[in-house]
């Protein structure tokens, strides 16, 4: 099973998330995780998708099908690039006076944070690679995990380049505080 | 100038060059219909919205222009779905306009409300819900741009009723700006050189011409290439007429019901140049058995088709016409006499085995199709339905005329023929249009006979009537122990039905009546329906069984 990480940029129009999800479903592409939010450009959303490429018949096919969606402006497979990969999890673990200290030791070791405490629980916030989050979850399980939420992977390629394609037609968008000194004039119509 | 949303819609359609729309009115589009008579657009009232979509599709396939259909909200919109999916599968440029309930009611399960944009997400190239009159004109302009550029396809625009009623100081929209939509426009010429190199070196080359050749209008370029390098051409069902079928280099359709020599040529070729074809399973059989000896050049305007079903040796993304124009000067003039002679030998063998020996007294469907071909000189626009009638049409009528055969290939929609023929006739009022259909498919949109009369269309309709859902019956005979479950099909006296609508109706029960009936139909200045009562259990041969390679054909059983 080969997992690939795709970064997709899309116009922030109503229903665009639905379009992507619908595409993946009908083409039978297996989504391991999907997260979406604003990007640095107003009007453009950024989606990070982890997809099982073997099941999809190759990651190229997934990319090309995404590009067929009119609202998608750019797709990049960053699986083999040096990337910063992170996931955030909130974990509510059963904790009473006798076990609280031990749990907090684990929190320290993982450089996580306690963000809520009650008589019977601790809520822990952790950011990191999926493996790191998995490890903490494993170690907390014996105490009893009451509730957990994970965001799924976000990724960003290392180095000074951004994702925005230099030759895109941006006449429809206002450039807020655009990246300076990149040598790219994103207001120029190509 | 202040215009209502409804006026803006028609204003925009006129700007897009629309001359005819096919539709059925209703509450959610009553504003549109109120404004319509003020504009030079002809409205064809259909009798079912499915037929409106097929008519827009048939119009687009016959003319190359964007077909437009119109329906009200709720059931009107859902009735368009099959027609939109049909257009989507065959890459037909179409814009479907639906009314939607007023914006405050959206999402409240209002009367005749349905989420048509949600429903048509997978079967449209793109779709829109317009809830703001300020976006209306630009949306329509974008929709037409998307429908007709790149790989054509259907686009749906759902317009809320209050948007149609609202008013706006109308301004012509500026240029379309779609940062996420960049149809391929420029070519990578190094791949052209590689393609020429492969072609020049090949000993048994073949061109596989698909619908993309016709969509690109590249029939002339294809012919030049085929003739220059003496390369035979096999077509897909939708590629029929990419090269005139009477041309000596044209082998006709390949695949599940292709003639044996077309499939044999495919399997023996050492180079296949696929032009605007998507390697559909009806053509290929299992892909690992398809064209096993060939190096493959795959030319397509849609990059996603390359590597989707079949891997190729040389991909070229681009418009087929542009590619062929760049390629022609670099391909050497050549001849392949041994290869062509081998193919001719296969043709002679097919003539005696699968191509029906026409010397029978029974009224067989292949004879009917052949006689229509003779009578029209191969120049009519023919619209087929789906099933055995479709296959016999593809096999026995040699289509020379570009865009001469309109057929639902990808979705295989029964009931397509009559409404699509209406669309084709509206697009070419002065040309002869024949709809050849089966009795099953004809009953699915039989109500459109009223449209034929209302519009005074001189449509010729030939029903190959065998009292069965023929293609399914054939499968049941060959693969399901001859159990005809759900396939015996009762139909009316079609000639009487035609007469009830005011259309000339003829019934043909004997072979000698066939030619006179066809000639009579062609002389009538108006619509004619001929009910051909053909032999009931005739099969389409050759047939490639599912799972078999295309050279492993079931051939016509030899008579003792």
Image: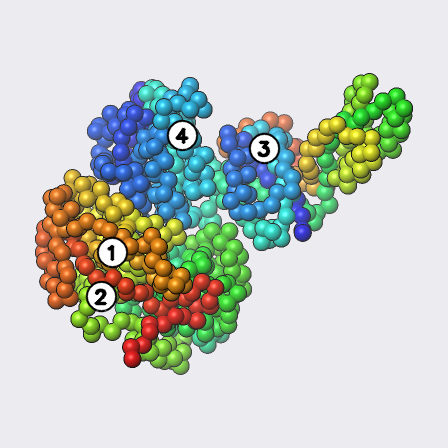
Q: Secondary structure at mark 2?
A: loop
Q: How many angstroms separate mark 3 from mark 4 (CA)?
A: 28 Å
Q: Are marks 2 and 1 on the same chain?
A: yes
Q: Which residue is mark 3?
A: A45
| Location of residue B269 by image quarter | bottom left
Q: Nearer the viewer, residue B369 or B8?
A: B369
- Give yes or no for contact between labels 3 and 1 (Cβ–Cβ under 8 Å): no
Q: Nearer the viewer, residue A104 or B164?
A: A104
Q: How many angstroms separate mark 4 from mark 2 (CA)?
A: 46 Å
For the point 15% across and 66% down, which residue is it?
A: B511
For the point 63% across and 40% down, which residue is it?
A: A49
Which label sits on residue B498? none
For the point 51% across and 57% down, which residue is it?
A: B309
Q: Earlier in the sequence, mark 2 or mark 1?
A: 2
Which label sits on residue B114? 4
Q: Which residue is mark 2?
A: B364
Q: How many angstroms separate mark 2 from mark 1 (CA)?
A: 14 Å
Could you classify mark 1 by the number of other residues whose Cα lies within 10 Å: few (under 14), some (14-19), or many (20 or more)? some
Image location of residue B390, percent across then percent down: 30, 58
| Location of residue A50 by image quarter | top right
Could you classify mark 4 by the number of other residues whose Cα lies within 10 Å: few (under 14), some (14-19), or many (20 or more)? many
Q: Secondary structure at mark 3?
A: strand
Q: Is residue B535 left or right of residue A31?
A: left
Q: Secondary structure at mark 1?
A: loop
């Amino acid at each position: 099973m080969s997992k690939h990480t795709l970064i997709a940029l899309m116009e922030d129009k109503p229903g665009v998330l639905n379009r992507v999800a619908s595409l993946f479903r009908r083409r039978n592409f297996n989504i391991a995780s999907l997260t979406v939010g604003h990007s640095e450009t107003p009007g453009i959303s950024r989606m990070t998708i982890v997809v099982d490429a073997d099941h999809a018949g190759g990651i190229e096919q997934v990319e090309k099908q995404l590009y067929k969606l009119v609202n998608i402006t750019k797709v990049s497979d960053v699986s083999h690039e040096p990337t910063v990969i992170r996931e955030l999890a909130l974990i509510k673990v059963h904790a009473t006076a006798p076990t609280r200290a031990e749990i907090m030791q684990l929190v320290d070791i993982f450089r996580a944070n306690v963000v809520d405490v009650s008589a019977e629980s601790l809520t822990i916030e952790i950011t990191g690679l999926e493996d790191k989050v998995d490890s903490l979850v494993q170690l907390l399980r014996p105490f009893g995990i009451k509730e957990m939420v994970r965001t799924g992977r976000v990724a960003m390629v290392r180095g000074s380049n951004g994702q925005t394609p230099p030759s895109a037609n941006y006449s429809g968008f206002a450039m807020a505080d655009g990246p300076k000194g990149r040598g790219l004039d994103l207001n120029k119509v190509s | 100038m202040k215009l209502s949303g409804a006026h803006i819609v028609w204003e925009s359609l006129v700007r897009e060059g629309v001359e005819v729309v096919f539709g059925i009115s209703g509450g959610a589009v009553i504003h549109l219909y109120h404004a319509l008579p003020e504009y030079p657009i002809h409205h064809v009232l259909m009798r079912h919205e499915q037929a409106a979509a097929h008519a827009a599709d048939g119009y687009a396939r016959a003319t190359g222009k964007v077909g437009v259909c119109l329906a009200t909200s709720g059931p009107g919109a859902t009735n368009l779905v099959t027609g939109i999916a049909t257009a989507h599968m065959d890459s037909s440029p179409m814009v479907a306009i639906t009314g939607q309930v007023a914006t405050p009611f959206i999402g409240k399960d209002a009367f005749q409300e349905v989420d048509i944009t949600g429903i048509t997400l997978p079967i449209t190239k793109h779709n829109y819900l317009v809830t703001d009159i300020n976006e209306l004109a630009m949306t329509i302009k974008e929709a037409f741009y998307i429908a007709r550029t790149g790989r054509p396809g259907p686009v749906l625009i759902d317009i809320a009723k209050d948007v149609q009623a609202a008013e706006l100081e109308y301004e012509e929209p500026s240029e379309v700006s779609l940062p996420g939509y960049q149809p391929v426009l420029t070519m990578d010429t190094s791949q052209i050189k590689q393609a020429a190199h492969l072609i020049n070196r090949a000993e048994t080359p073949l061109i596989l011409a698909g619908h993309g050749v016709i969509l690109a209008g590249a029939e002339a370029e294809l012919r030049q290439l085929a003739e220059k390098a003496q390369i035979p051409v096999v077509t897909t069902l939708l590629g029929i007429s990419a090269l005139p079928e009477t041309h000596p280099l044209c082998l006709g359709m390949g695949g599940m019901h292709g003639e044996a020599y077309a499939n044999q040529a495919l399997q023996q070729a050492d180079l296949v140049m696929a032009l605007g074809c998507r390697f559909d399973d009806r053509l290929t059989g299992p892909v690992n058995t398809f064209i096993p000896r060939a190096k493959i050049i795959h030319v397509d305007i849609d990059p996603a088709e390359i590597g989707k079903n079949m891997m190729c040796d040389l991909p070229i993304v681009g418009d087929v016409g542009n590619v062929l124009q760049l390629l022609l000067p670099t391909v050497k003039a050549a001849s392949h006499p041994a290869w062509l002679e081998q193919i001719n030998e296969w043709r002679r063998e097919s003539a005696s085995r699968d191509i029906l020996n026409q010397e029978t007294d029974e009224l067989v469907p292949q004879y009917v199709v052949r006689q229509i071909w003779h009578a029209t000189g191969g120049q009519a626009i023919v619209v087929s339905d789906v099933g055995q009638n479709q296959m016999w049409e593809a096999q026995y009528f040699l289509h020379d005329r570009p865009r001469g055969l309109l057929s639902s290939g990808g979705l295989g929609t029964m009931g397509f023929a009559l409404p699509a023929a209406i669309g084709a006739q509206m697009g070419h009022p002065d040309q002869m249009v024949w709809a050849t259909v089966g009795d099953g498919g004809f009953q699915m949109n039989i109500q459109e006979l009223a449209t034929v009369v209302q519009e005074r269309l001189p449509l010729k309709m030939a029903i190959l009537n065998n009292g069965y859902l023929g293609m399914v019956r054939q499968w049941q005979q060959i693969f399901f122990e001859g159990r005809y479950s759900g396939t015996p099909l009762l139909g009316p006296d079609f000639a009487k039905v035609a007469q009830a609508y005011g259309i000339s109706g003829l019934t043909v029960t004997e072979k000698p009546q066939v030619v006179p009936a066809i000639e009579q139909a062609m002389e009538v200045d108006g619509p004619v329906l001929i009910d051909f009562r053909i032999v009931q259990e005739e099969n389409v041969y050759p047939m490639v069984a599912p799972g078999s390679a295309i050279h492993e054909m079931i051939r016509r059983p030899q008579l003792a």
